[in-house]
Amino acid sequence: MPLDKIAKQFGFDPPREEGTNTVEACEGIIAGKVKAFFGLGGNFVRAIPERAAMEEAWTRMDLTVQIATKLNRSHLVNGKSAYLLPCLGRTEQDIQASGPQTVTMEDTFSCIHGSIARRKPASEHLLSELAIVAGLAKASLPANPKVKWDEWVGDYGLVRDLIAETYPDEFHDFNARMFTPGGFYRGNAARERIWKTKSGKAEFTTPTTLTSTGFKDAPGRYRLLTMRSNDQFNTTIYGLSDRLRGIEGTRDVLLINPEDIARAGLRDGQMVSLVSDADDRVHREVGPLKVTPFKLPDGCVGSYYPEMNPLIALSHHDEKSKTPANKSVPVRIRA
């Protein structure tokens, strides 16, 4: 077990209980049970459902801390005490005690690549993310001879050696392999048809219902799927040209098939709003959106993520993973 190995490596007992997923964290913040939020990058407030309630609850937290390379919407919504800690980006030179540092990243094909920065840092005062986290840990935790914060900040290769020691099957010889052309393959059990089940085989379950969305069809109710454009990474939008769908100059659109447009008494180019239809008496609305004919199944409409997040009820999520149900949101169209 990796946790057993970590306990032996560093001389402390790591937590064994499950952590908090996105939905549970949001529920805790709204209920006032979560008192602080510490974010290493990301744009949490922008990425989550139930945005109106979440932004209001966010300001009631005692402490919010964001470590970031670029500004985003989450930095505009803060707790009672708030810190925004800018850090070095991956393209900025990171000079530590042992010299220039290398960081690594994993691509979508489970390959690990080394990355050497070339650009001068935006400020001489910027710290790396590792230096910030290690500095906070060193200042707040009891001294531990097995936990060598200063050495790790001085040489990131030492951190990679520890990762290789903890996960030898995937990360053996980490430092030696990180500049393998195309990256070194970390491994993907499912791709290799290795099924980590009791039977050692792929196991299929029988669905208990004919719908996986958690809500039924109803007159005037549509199923909204949220989507990203080709020039978008997570919540970061680089432009307004979506060549995947032929949409130019805007993201304020409602994709709907021509038959549904006619049945609803709408017209191409009309401006409408979407209203949540979650049956929980909470008003959620986004608009104006331009009616745009698009080939979609009857009863389905589409628009962009994260702009449509305010329509998603926090309670609407996958039963086991608690993943917010961004791909099927019950909505109505308001002309």
Image (spheres, rainbow, N blue to C red):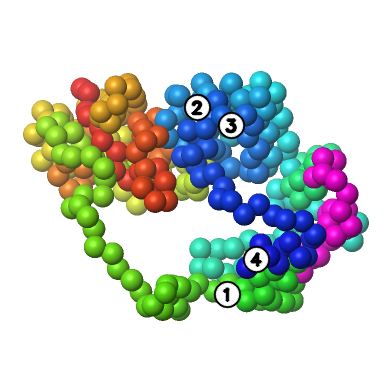
- Side of 293 relative to 61 (left or right): left
Q: Residue 32 at x, y = what percent? A: 55, 25
Q: Which residue is nearer to you in this view: 83 or 290? A: 83
- Which mark identifies residue 185? 1
Task: Give neighbour class at mark 2: few <14, some 14-19, many 20+ (Cα, 10 Å).
Answer: some
Task: Give neighbour class at mark 3: few <14, some 14-19, many 20+ (Cα, 10 Å).
Answer: some
Name the N-terminal-most of marks 4 and 1: 4
Q: Which residue is nearer to you in this view: 294 or 203? A: 203
Name the N-terminal-most of marks 4 and 2: 4
For residue 326, say whether it is visible.
Answer: no
Tell us which disc is closer to us: 3 or 1. Answer: 3
Tell me how far mark 1 sits from mark 2, CA to CA: 41 Å
- Which mark identifies residue 2? 4
User: Which quarter of the picture shows residue 95?
Assistant: bottom right
Q: Which residue is labeled 2 in the image?
A: 30
Q: Residue 150 at x, y = what percent? A: 88, 53
Residue drawn where x is 36% and y is 47% of the image: 318
Q: Are marks 1 and 2 in contact (CB under 8 Å)?
A: no
Residue drawn where x is 22% and y is 28% of the image: 333
On screen, 60 above or below 85? above
Amino acid residing under circle 3: Val
- Badge 1 element: strand
Tell me how far mark 3 sits from mark 2, CA to CA: 8 Å
From which residue to which does the magenta span run?
A: 137-161
Tell me how far mark 4 sits from mark 2, CA to CA: 33 Å
Q: Which residue is labeled 3 in the image?
A: 34
On screen, 151 above or below 229? below
Name the N-terminal-most of marks 3 and 4: 4
Task: Give neighbour class at mark 4: few <14, some 14-19, many 20+ (Cα, 10 Å).
Answer: few
Tell us which disc is closer to us: 1 or 2. Answer: 2
